[in-house]
Structure formats: C-alpha cells, structure tokens
Image (cartoon, helix red, strand yellow):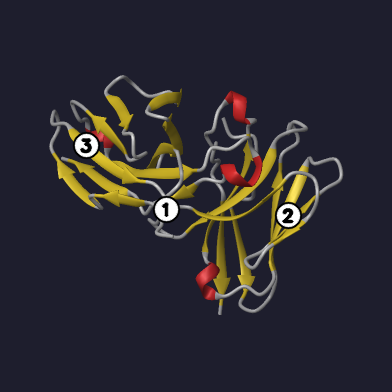
Amino acid sequence: DAKTTQPTSMDCAEGRAANLPCNHSTISGNEYVYWYRQIHSQGPQYIIHGLKNNETNEMASLIITEDRKSSTLILPHATLRDTAVYYCIVREPRDTGNQFYFGTGTSLTVIP
Amino acid sequence: KAGVTQTPRYLIKTRGQQVTLSCSPISGHRSVSWYQQTPGQGLQFLFEYFSETQRNKGNFPGRFSGRQFSNSRSEMNVSTLELGDSALYLCASSFYGRGGPTDTQYFGPGTRLTVL
C-alpha cells in the first residue's frame, strides 16, 4: 500500500518554480523516495529519486528533509508541458519486492 | 536505447474472452513488472518477472497471469474477461541490480483494454 501523502492538486504559473510536497512519515532507513509523473493516458515517466541527500538532474530537484519524513520535488521553471499527475513513491527494499506502490498523486496544472 | 514497447496499444474485447498483452523491455533490462491502472483504483501492481520466474505478485485473481521469455520479453494474459478489467495495462522494465539507480523502473506507453 502507498506510504505517501500528497496534495490532490496544485496550480503553478508558467515560468515559476513548482514545489510539490510529499509526506512519508513511516519511511524506513533503506527506502528510497522516487518521483514519477504521468501525462494523461501515457505511461509514467521517471523524474528523480533519492535516499538521504538532495538530488538534482536535468528535469528537477529533490529535497529530502533531514528526518526523511517528507520531501519536495522542485521543477525550477514550469512549462505547460509539465502539466501532469506527479507521484511520490517510497520504494521498498529489493528483498521485499520490486514493485512501486503508487498513491493518488498530485495533479499539477501549469497556468499560462 | 529504445524504450519499453507494448503491443497492441489498443484492444477491444467482449466479456468472457481472453487477451494476451506483450511487453518488450529496454535492451539489457532483465526485470519486467506489470501494472493495471483504472480511474477508481489508480495504478496497481500485478506481478514482476525476472529470469523467466515470477518474483512478486500483487493482489489480483488467478485470471491474471504472465510469463517471461529468455530474451526478457514478457506477456500477460487475462482469461474470462470481465467489464471491470477495462483498464490501461502498463509494463515497466528495470535492470534488477542490488538496489539504487539500477532498479529504476521505466514504463511503456501502455495497452488500453476495453471490455464490452
């Protein structure tokens, strides 16, 4: 079952940073936080993941709090193409399964 | 590298029929997972295959089955289709290392199954 809590929806102005929060208060020490997004009726697209440290790639930044109970995905300059459902996922250790438990995600709308 | 491919992309069946969906993973990836996505239940894990063996299984009835071939390609089968099986079926592949970056799952575009 999903171990994360995300707001149902958010809006962001085009060109501004989009900050998507996620709570994962029961995360274990060896569980990673993954972010995917899904544009309507397409397959989920991998964005970024992290364990303890903040991470950045060409798509986004991931900020994980020191106690690891929450994280924030940052899209630095949101565009209309970033409108999608964003899923924050806590990934179980390999030995207990390779599946990802998707919650309901956050529907992000980028407004022109 | 080519991404995960799924065939067919769209499928219409009637109740009681069976259906087989196909998934070709990213070259070099050895694990294939299947998910079902419906408006009511969201994305739900069906099963995962690695080295032609089912490693994990979600909470779905036995009508849902799958297999993996020696080239890592995978198929899933749904027998005795029900109206509630209408969904987007997604396949994801990963390298299946010992955790960390190599275990990131990459999803295909999905197969949209409609049961009439």
| Residue B6 visible, this orientation | yes
Residue at image point 63% right, 70% down: A12
Residue linked to disc 2: A72
Please state the chain letter of the residue tagged with numbered disc 2 in the rendered image: A
Q: Amino acid at mark 2?
A: Thr
Please state the chain letter of the residue tagged with numbered disc 1 in the rendered image: A
State which tag comes first along the sequence, 2 or 1: 1
**Residue B86 is drawn in which quadrant?**
top left
Residue linked to disc 3: B20
Element type where label 1 sits in the image: loop
Question: Are the residues flagged by discs 3 and 1 from a single subunit?
Answer: no
Label 3 to label 1: alpha-carbon separation: 19 Å
Label 2 to label 1: alpha-carbon separation: 22 Å
Q: Is A66 located above or below residue A74 in the figure?
A: above
Q: Amino acid at mark 1?
A: Gly
Other-residue count near label 3 (Cα within 10 Å), few / some / many at <14 / 14–19 / ≥20:
few
Please identify the quadrant where the C terminus of chain A is shown: bottom right
Name the disc covering residue A43, or none.
Answer: 1
Please identify the quadrant where the N terminus of chain A is shown: top right
What number of labels is visible?
A: 3
